[in-house]
Amino acid sequence: MAVTQGMQPVVLEGFQVEPDQRELVKLLGERHVLDGAEDRGSEKTAKIKMAVEKALNDSRSLIQPKGIYEIVTGEEIDGPAQFARLERVAICICTIGIALEETVKVAMDAGRMLEGIVLDAVGSAAAEAVARYMNDRIEEVAAAEGLRTSCRASPGYGDWDVGGQRRLFDLLPAERIGVSLTPGSMMVPRKSVSFAVHVDKDPVRLRSENSCRNCDMDTCPYRLDE
């Protein structure tokens, strides 16, 4: 598949991803579960470890990864000003599907809070794993033509307003992978990710890739350690 404007959207499905366990524990705010910072034999740690193991096992039948991407010009995107001058931008929407989210709701409604919270975190880690998978595939296609890709940028992070999400959905037929957008620009299923990367011999540094350093959300679990 050539990395050119006007190409047909590419849908990828039927692949598998594995949630990163350290990312999962970071999302839960319980890093000691894996890094040994607290007593591994404590009752709390044991319960969390068991819940993580169960959630990871249960999630294998609930995670249904799909993604769609397309190459457009930067000026087609309702994003930061620097996008306008970019010749090739890969835009992508991907998801783990709705099954895990529905299972989380069942657990929560039944009062199984720890189970629901941990499984929800697994879903977040899995969604990020799907985004990495899609980004890797775009990177491979670009590399076949002697091109490289920038870091990912997403609506709602850094200087890219979340309202820019709607333009990505205008450009990509996300319904083909079962993803829709609410009036407030939130994706459904919730465990979905949208992003853009610059494709070029010398890709620019998208300002959004520095969002962890510039963002004032110091409690965000995805924040990079300084």
Image: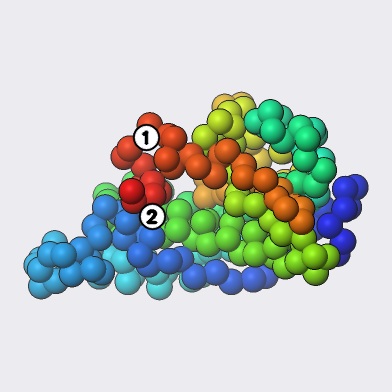
Residue 6: x %, y % from top left = 90, 47
Q: Amino acid at mark 1?
A: Met
Residue 51: x %, y % from top left = 28, 65
What residue is shown at x 61% (from left), y 64% (from top)? 133
- Badge 1 element: loop
Residue 47 appears anywhere in the view = no
Q: From this view, report whether residue 112 is shown above or below residue 14.
A: above
Q: Nearer the viewer, residue 7 or 105?
A: 7
Q: Residues within 10 Å of mark 2 (few under 14, many from 20)?
A: many
| Disc sitting over residue 66 in the figure | none
Circle count: 2
- Which residue in the protein does label 2 denote? 121
Q: From this view, report whether residue 133 is shown above or below residue 68.
A: below
Q: Amino acid at mark 2?
A: Ala
What residue is shown at x 37% (from left), y 60% (from top)? 24
Spatial CA span between label 1 and label 2: 19 Å
